[in-house]
Amino acid sequence: MARNMTIDSLLRKIQSEINKIWKLDPDKVDPITYKQYLDKARVMGYLCSVGGQLLEKHDLEKRLDRIEQELEKLDESRRVA
């Protein structure tokens, strides 16, 4: 089973892929292999971007739920008073 995704894990994965590509020398690597690494990097960047957006939205949704609960408690206490 996959681990839960966090912003930190996304950043680590992106950094790892950047380092791999940074070390590639296009003159010493087969052009097809080089292109495949670049394609992989593009896909990883896209997926990390989408994952980051989902994490942010999930966090905002949880925060909004907590605020709504607090407002409901406040409303109930005003009705009682």
Image (cartoon, rainbow, N blue to C red):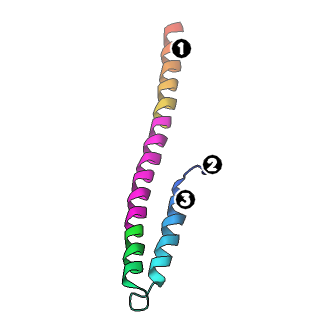
- Read off the residue under disc 1: 77
Residue at 50% across, 77% down: 19
Q: Using the numbered discs, state the Cα–Cα distance from disc 3 to disc 2 in whole angstroms.
A: 19 Å
Q: Using the numbered discs, state the Cα–Cα distance from disc 1 to disc 2 in whole angstroms.
A: 44 Å
* Residue 41 part of the magenta-drawn span: no
Q: Residues within 10 Å of mark 1 (few under 14, many from 20)?
A: few
- Read off the residue under disc 2: 1
| Up-down relation of residue 35 to residue 4 (above or below) | below
* Label total for image: 3
**Residue 51: x percent and y percent?**
45, 52
Which numbered dot is residue 41?
A: none
> As rendered, which of 47 and 34 lies closer to the eye?
34
Identify residue type, mark 3.
Asp
Image marks 3 and 2: residues in contact by CB distance under 8 Å: no
- Read off the residue under disc 3: 8
**Residue 8: x percent and y percent?**
55, 59
Horizontally, residue 50 falls left or right of residue 81, namely left
Where is residue 22, by image quadrant?
A: bottom left
Q: Closer to us: mark 3 or mark 2?
A: 2
The residue range painted magenta reads: 42-62
Q: Closer to us: mark 1 or mark 3?
A: 3
Q: Secondary structure at mark 2?
A: loop
Identify residue type, mark 2.
Met
Identify residue type, mark 1.
Ser
> As rendered, which of 79 and 43 lies closer to the eye?
43
Q: Using the numbered discs, state the Cα–Cα distance from disc 1 to disc 3 in whole angstroms.
A: 40 Å
The answer to which of marks 1 and 3 sits earlier in the sequence is 3
Q: Secondary structure at mark 1?
A: helix
Residue at 37% across, 79% down: 32
> As rendered, which of 30 and 74 lies closer to the eye?
30
| Up-down relation of residue 67 to residue 18 (above or below) | above
